[in-house]
Structure formats: structure tokens, C-alpha cells
Amino acid sequence: MNKIKNKVQLIGNVGEDPMITVLDKERKKARLSLATNEYFKNAEGGKVKRTYWHTLVTWGKVADIVEKHVVKGKEIAIEGKLVSRSYEDKDGNKRYVTEVIVSEILLLGSIEKKQDTDDDAL
């Protein structure tokens, strides 16, 4: 058990279009949400679906892939690690955040390029 490391693998659907940020003129970051589902039977034997939401952060080449091919609703598989941090909000309350830092992404289903909104302008 001494070889266990911080590793997360998830398959789910993207909850919103990714937010892309360019830092230092070259370094790119993408932030997005991922919904995963769990199914189980309740005490009465009925099927229950529970959805969990995960915040994903990608950097560099993975962020480039996200920017070009990932949109709301797209099914993806990711691998990464969990990180937690805390900060104080503007009211002085301590807030905690847990995110998945994505190291690999697999686009499931067909690959579709994002539509350029400038092409739709008249």
C-alpha cells in the first residue's frame, strides 16, 4: 500500500463551456465542470441517480485540446490529481476548494470543433 498516490480518473459530461485564460502571454489554463453519475437502488428498490460535480483545471497542451474540442455536454474521460486549497472571501470567510488538476484527457464520442461565433456575424 506504500505505492498509493494521488490519482483520479473520471468519465462524465461537461457542465458548461470551458473558461479559457491566457497567463503570461503564453501559458494557457482551462477551467471547466464535469458531471459524473452514480446509480443505486434505494430502500424501496427504486433506481436512484445521483450526480456529482467536479471542477477541472487543465494547463498547456491539455488546455489547448479543451479550448478546441470541448463544449457543454461533451462526454470526456480524464486523469489527474486532487488538490485542495483555502482562501478568504471578500467578507473574511474562509472558503475551501477541491479541484482536479487534469494531466490527460480523452474525448469520447465524435470530435467536434467549437463553432467560431465570428462566422455567424452578419
Image (cartoon, rainbow, N blue to C red):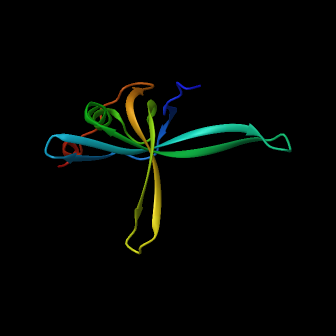
Q: Is residue 77 above or below residue 44?
A: above
The x, y position of residue 55, in whole percent, is: 45, 46
Q: Residue at x 84, y 40 (%)?
A: 45
Quarter residue 61 falls in: top left
Please tell me how many numbered marks the rendered image carries.
0
Q: Compare residues 60 and 49 and report the one nearer the observer.
A: 60
Q: Residue at x 28, y 34 (%)?
A: 68
Question: Going by the picture, which residue comes out furthest to the front?
Answer: 2
Q: Compare residues 8 and 22 and report the one nearer the observer.
A: 8
Instruction: State left or right for residue 22 relative to residue 41.
Output: left
Q: Compare residues 44 and 58 and report the one nearer the observer.
A: 58
Quarter residue 104 falls in: top left
Q: Residue at x 69, y 37 (%)?
A: 39
Question: Going by the picture, which residue comes out furthest to the bottom?
Answer: 91
Instruction: State left or right for residue 93 relative to residue 28.
Output: right
Quarter residue 41 falls in: top right
Instruction: State left or right for residue 25 relative to residue 64.
Output: left
